[in-house]
């Protein structure tokens, strides 16, 4: 073949290659489904920002409803405090709520705020069979759509009736989290890259599965949602939402939780729980929420309005009035400078009476008793506590408070008070609460000189606190044992007190008194000296020293010790001086 013919052949090949290359996008455009030009408008670009408004990252997503529901990747939102969505026309919309997320499969569902109906991709709910044609629809602001096309190679079970798909086309990083669509224009998956890095195929998580994700009642404790500071959607069920509200109250600071309460009320405007919780919150944390007394007053006014709203929507209005009365009483007691008739003890009583009129419950009577007790009306307080004690809701506290109210009445019978304390202790059982009531009973027994019973109560107290007692406990039990005549037991207790607190002169004086009763005078004198080394002006120790010397027939030394006791002001020594030294 001549050189001219070779040259002509090469030109024809070059021309053919040029024609083929030029015709490829035209062919692709001709093969593009009719629905694709409209469908591409449902693909969006997501941009996330941190709490300092610095950009974190960008990623793809797509709308699945005309009201602004979007599916994308969880990793795009991790650490985000704010996010926006930009459509193919360059319009930007704020992300308002996270509806559901799954960190394991790296997917998320969220809402954006839209002023009008948005283009969206309808969802395929059934599993797509292997061999079905799939289209990848990336985000693009260009008029021409660049898409990928291939087959569904595998469909494996994801969860329940949802699938995870393997697709017959590769995926670029910039195309991740875009929609995978059927030839009918319905979306069935969210595209994900091949984790092996080979980039020969790609994968898709079922879009229907992502659409099923939602925040549950316990997700307030879920770290998946903690990693995103954007507002979360409430569970659709009011009862579940109320549980979420309660859980968040234990995790958020006062101002953040107020925002959460406001959001709950906006979402459930006819739910009494929101208004009651917000009222209680602003009353309790008004000092943290406000910087001036005027602002605090506004929060108290808000609380009153919220209680009115709660009563309007509640099926149990008595409970609302009870909670309102409890809040009023708490404010009136803690802030005596507040000059507002709404927040007085008198109004607490009046509000509580409305609750009792609707439903006379023991818990309402308990609060009534507390208010009467605070006001010093012990007879009415006792009667209120009695109503609680006669019910199935009687508690150790209600029995104890009945005893205290009884104690404050004129002519109170101490034996009756002990009976009420007995009931409080029995109801408390083997608890630390019961231990406090036992100490109260010990105090009453002392008035009656019931020393044997006092020792038994000290032993009970020791068991209730699992032996976690201090030196004072042994000192007081020793005195009770001393008065029962149990000198050995008394000596053991006071010596234990000394081991625990060896620099207390009172303990050595007690030890000396016990040794004196045991006629161990030398040991008693040693204990006296140890007490005087710590407290040289301890007058009673000189009296004990004098008694020991009298028992040892050492009259001069005894009278010298008695004289020193008198000099230091001992009120009991005069009788001994008159008897032994005159």
Image (tube, rainbow, N blue to C red):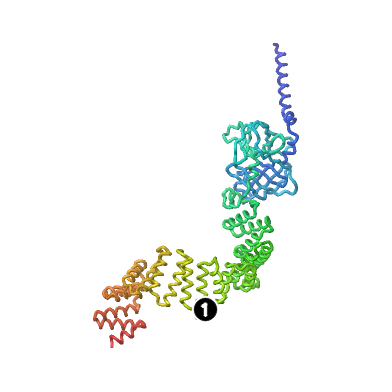
Report the front residue among 7 and 80. Answer: 80
Residue 118, percent from left and from top: 73, 45
Quadrant containing the N terminus is top right
Residue 4, percent from left and from top: 72, 13
Residue 160's place in the image compared with 332, above or below, is above
Residue 40: image quadrant is top right
Residue 64's place in the image compared with 17, above or below, is below
Residue 543 visible in the displayed image: yes
At x 40%, y 77%, the residue is 449
Report the front residue among 94 and 418. Answer: 418
Residue 580's place in the image compared with 378, above or below, is below
Q: Which secondary structure, mark 1?
A: loop
Residue 169 visible in the displayed image: no
Residue 463: image quadrant is bottom left
Residue 561: image quadrant is bottom left
Residue 296, percent from left and from top: 63, 66
Dot 1 corresponds to which residue? 409
At x 71%, y 26%, the residue is 21
Left or right: 519 in relation to 52:
left
Residue 555, percent from left and from top: 25, 83
Quadrant containing the C terminus is bottom left
Counting other residues with Cα less than 10 Å from the Cα at mark 1, is it few (<14), some (14-19), or many (20 or more)?
some
Report the front residue among 517 and 117. Answer: 517
Q: How many marks?
A: 1
Q: Residue furthest top?
A: 1
Q: Residue furthest left?
A: 553
């Amino acid at each position: 073949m001549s050189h001219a013919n070779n040259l002509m052949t090469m030109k024809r090949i070059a021309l053919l290659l040029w024609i083929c290359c030029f015709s490829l996008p035209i062919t692709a455009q001709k093969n593009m489904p009719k629905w694709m030009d409209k469908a591409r408008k449902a693909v969006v670009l997501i941009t996330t920002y941190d709490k300092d408004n610095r950009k974190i990252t960008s990623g793809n997503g797509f709308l699945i409803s005309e009201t602004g529901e979007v599916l994308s990747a969880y990793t795009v939102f991790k650490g985000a405090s704010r996010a926006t969505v930009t459509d193919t026309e360059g319009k930007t919309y704020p992300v308002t709520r996270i509806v559901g997320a799954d960190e394991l499969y790296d997917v998320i569902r969220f809402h954006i705020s839209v002023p009008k109906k948005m283009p969206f991709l309808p969802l395929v709910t059934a599993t797509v069979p292997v061999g079905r044609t799939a289209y990848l629809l990336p985000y693009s602001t260009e008029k021409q759509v660049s898409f990928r096309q291939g087959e569904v190679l595998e469909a494996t079970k994801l969860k329940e009736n949802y699938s995870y798909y393997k697709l017959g086309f590769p995926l670029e990083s910039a195309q991740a989290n875009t929609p995978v669509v059927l030839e009918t224009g319905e979306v069935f998956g969210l595209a994900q890259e091949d984790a092996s890095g080979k980039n020969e195929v790609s994968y898709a998580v079922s879009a229907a599965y992502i659409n099923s994700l939602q925040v549950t009642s316990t997700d307030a404790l879920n770290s998946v949602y903690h990693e995103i500071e954007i507002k979360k959607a409430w569970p659709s069920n009011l009862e579940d939402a109320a549980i979420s509200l309660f859980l968040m109250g234990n995790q958020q600071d006062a101002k953040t939780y107020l925002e959460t309460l406001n959001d709950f009320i906006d979402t459930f405007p006819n739910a009494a729980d929101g208004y009651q919780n917000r009222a209680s919150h602003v009353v309790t944390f008004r000092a943290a929420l406000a910087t001036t007394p005027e602002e605090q007053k506004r929060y108290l006014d808000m609380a009153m309005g919220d209680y009115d709203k709660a009563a309007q929507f509640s099926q149990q209005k008595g409970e609302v009035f009870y909670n309102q009365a409890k809040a009023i009483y708490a404010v009136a007691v803690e802030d005596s400078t507040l000059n507002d008739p709404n927040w007085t003890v008198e109004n607490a009583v009046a509000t509580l009476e409305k609750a009792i009129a609707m439903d006379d419950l023991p818990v309402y009577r308990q609060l009534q008793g507390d208010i009467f007790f605070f006001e010093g009306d012990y007879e009415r307080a006792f009667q209120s506590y009695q109503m609680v004690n006669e019910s199935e809701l009687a508690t150790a506290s209600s029995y104890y408070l009945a005893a205290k109210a009884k104690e404050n009445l004129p002519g109170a019978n101490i034996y009756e008070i002990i009976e009420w304390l007995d009931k409080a202790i029995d109801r408390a059982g083997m608890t630390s609460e019961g231990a406090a009531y036992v100490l109260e009973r010990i105090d009453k027994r002392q008035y009656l000189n019931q020393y044997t019973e006092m020792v038994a109560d000290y032993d009970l107290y020791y068991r209730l606190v699992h032996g976690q007692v201090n030196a004072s406990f042994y000192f007081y039990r020793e005195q009770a044992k001393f008065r029962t005549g149990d000198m050995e037991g008394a000596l053991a207790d006071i010596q234990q007190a000394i081991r625990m607190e060896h620099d207390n002169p009172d303990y050595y004086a007690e030890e000396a008194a016990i040794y004196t009763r045991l006629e161990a005078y030398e040991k008693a004198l040693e204990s006296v000296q140890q007490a005087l080394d710590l407290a040289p002006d301890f007058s009673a120790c000189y009296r004990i020293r004098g008694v020991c010397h009298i028992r040892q027939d050492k009259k001069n030394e005894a009278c010298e010790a008695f004289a020193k006791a008198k000099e230091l002001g001992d009120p009991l020594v005069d009788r001994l001086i008159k008897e032994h030294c005159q």
